Image (spheres, rainbow, N blue to C red):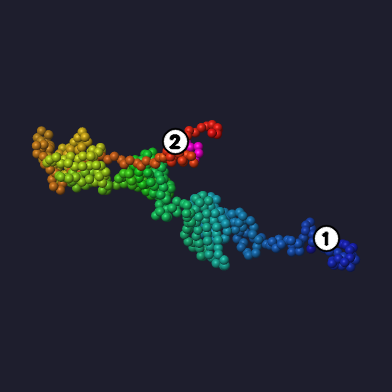
């Protein structure tokens, strides 16, 4: 060990005595500039234990007692999983913090929890000597957090995902697989597939009309079925609330939505007197001496009068349906009408229905009504009359009770004036105090 020699002529110093020199002396280790210098750091005051510690040799060095370098185990500077032979996450068993910074390298075949994402991988173990490991993957691009474990460094459990209580996925869990209910605006329904399955309320016909792809201009619930993808198979169901409409539409992979298809049921069909199903809205069944109304027809103040044999009057309706069928006469087993019918709308809006026996008109070569022989509608048979239906009015938004011209300058006075029904004083631009 190289030393510098300091000599002193002082007596009574606690240093070794050099008989050859006749003086007291001490030697100080020199820190630099001398070849083959190997100082004893333990002799340097304040050096501490870290100064004499041994650094880790690589990211794999987990020797107890060594000093960790920045970057080892991903601390301070995360390691790429590919830099340590971990392109396949099943092989990432060394404890540490790792990163994946390329979208293309994240594939399901390489055992990433989701494809095409960048993120951070944490590999953790438990105390003792064993093969238990946990992996946590945090996606920086999708924001999702996944975890899994192994007990033998070879067989991993399936990835499990943590779900945020504020996310649409959590809302779907607590809403039987659907996202939280939400009000629909004038946004086209075809743009909502990417948000996942949903239940939405369209409360106004104006918004439905502006959106352009609703089945009709009325209030309705929309049930959207999809897997959070704008291109995957999807379907939408509409249930009218201010209309009896019930229908659906759908599209296949990367396709466009089909037209809306109305589902037929008792709400929009009727079985006529011959047993056939027909489209219906308000329908009146006219028997020989009474009428029956379906639910939609009951909304109109309809009454019935019989003025003689085969002479019937329906009052209070909105008239015949303006599209599709509106009168259906019962038929026999051969498809022949069992009665001849003459009908018209009177000037006051009442509907006149008259029934007669049938006769063959030679000139017309057709079966016509025998106007000289009226007859009642046969027992247990009826004539179906389909009526016009007006859409239900939409509920108006509640208006403020405060008059438009009411512009108070003092809140307390304004409240007092409003309660007393006194008009507020005009607002003055003057700064004059009165």
345 is higher (above) or lower (below) than 103: above
Q: Secondary structure at mark 1?
A: strand
Query: Which quadrant does the C terminus fall into?
Result: top right
44 is higher (above) or lower (below) than 115: below
Asked if residue 26 is among those painted magenta in the image, a careful observer would answer: no
Q: Residues within 10 Å of mark 2 (few under 14, many from 20)?
A: some
First in sequence: mark 2 or mark 1? 1
Q: Residue at x 40, y 44 (%)?
A: 184
Residue 178 visible in the picture: yes
Q: Nearer the viewer, residue 160 or 382?
A: 382
The percent coordinates of residue 328 (x first, y second) are 19, 42
The percent coordinates of residue 325 (x first, y second) are 22, 40
Label the magenta part by its dominant secondary structure. Answer: loop
In the picture, measured across the screen, residue 218 lies left or right of residue 93, that is left
Q: Quadrant of residue 25?
A: bottom right
Q: Are marks 2 and 1 in contact (CB under 8 Å)?
A: no
Q: Residue at x 70, y 63 (%)?
A: 49
Residues drawn in magenta: 403-411
């Amino acid at each position: 060990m190289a030393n510098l020699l300091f000599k002193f002529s002082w007596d009574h110093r606690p240093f070794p005595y050099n008989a050859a020199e006749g003086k007291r002396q001490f030697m100080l280790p020199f820190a630099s500039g001398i070849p083959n210098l190997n100082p004893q750091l333990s002799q340097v005051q304040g050096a501490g234990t870290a100064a004499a510690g041994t650094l880790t040799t690589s990211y794999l060095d987990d020797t107890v007692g060594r000093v960790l370098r920045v970057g080892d185990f991903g601390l301070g500077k995360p390691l790429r999983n590919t830099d340590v032979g971990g392109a396949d996450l099943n092989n990432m068993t060394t404890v540490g913090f790792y990163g994946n910074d390329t979208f293309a390298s994240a594939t399901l075949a390489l055992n990433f929890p989701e494809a095409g994402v960048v993120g951070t991988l944490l590999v953790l173990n438990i105390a003792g000597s064993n093969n238990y490991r946990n992996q946590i993957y945090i996606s920086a691009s999708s924001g999702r957090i996944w975890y899994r474990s192994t007990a033998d460094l070879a067989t991993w459990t399936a990835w499990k995902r943590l779900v945020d209580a504020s996310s649409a996925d959590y809302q779907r869990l607590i809403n039987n697989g659907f996202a939280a209910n939400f009000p629909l605006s004038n946004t086209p329904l075809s743009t909502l597939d990417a948000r996942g399955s949903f239940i939405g309320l369209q409360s106004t016909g104006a918004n439905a009309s502006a959106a352009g792809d609703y089945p009709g201009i009325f209030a309705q619930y929309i049930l959207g079925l999809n897997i959070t993808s704008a291109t995957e198979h999807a379907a939408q169901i509409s249930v009218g609330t201010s209309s009896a409409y019930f229908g659906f539409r759908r599209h296949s992979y990367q396709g466009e939505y089909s037209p809306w298809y109305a589902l037929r049921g008792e709400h929009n069909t009727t079985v006529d007197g011959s047993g056939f199903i027909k489209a219906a809205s308000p329908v009146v069944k006219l028997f020989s001496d009474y009428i029956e109304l379906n639910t939609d027809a009951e909304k109109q103040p309809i009454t019935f009068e019989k003025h003689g044999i085969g002479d019937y009057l329906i009052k209070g309706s909105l008239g015949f349906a303006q599209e599709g069928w509106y009168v259906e006469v019962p038929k026999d087993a051969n498809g022949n009408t069992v009665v001849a019918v003459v009908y018209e709308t009177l000037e006051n809006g009442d509907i006149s229905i008259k029934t007669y026996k049938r006769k063959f008109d030679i000139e017309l070569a057709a079966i016509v009504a025998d106007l000289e022989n009226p007859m009642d509608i046969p027992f247990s048979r009826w004539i179906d009359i389909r009526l016009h239906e007006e859409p239900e009015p939409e509920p108006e938004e509640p208006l403020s009770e405060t008059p438009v011209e009411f512009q108070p300058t003092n809140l307390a006075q304004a409240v007092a004036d409003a309660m007393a029904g006194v008009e507020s004083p005009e607002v003055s631009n003057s700064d004059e105090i009165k």
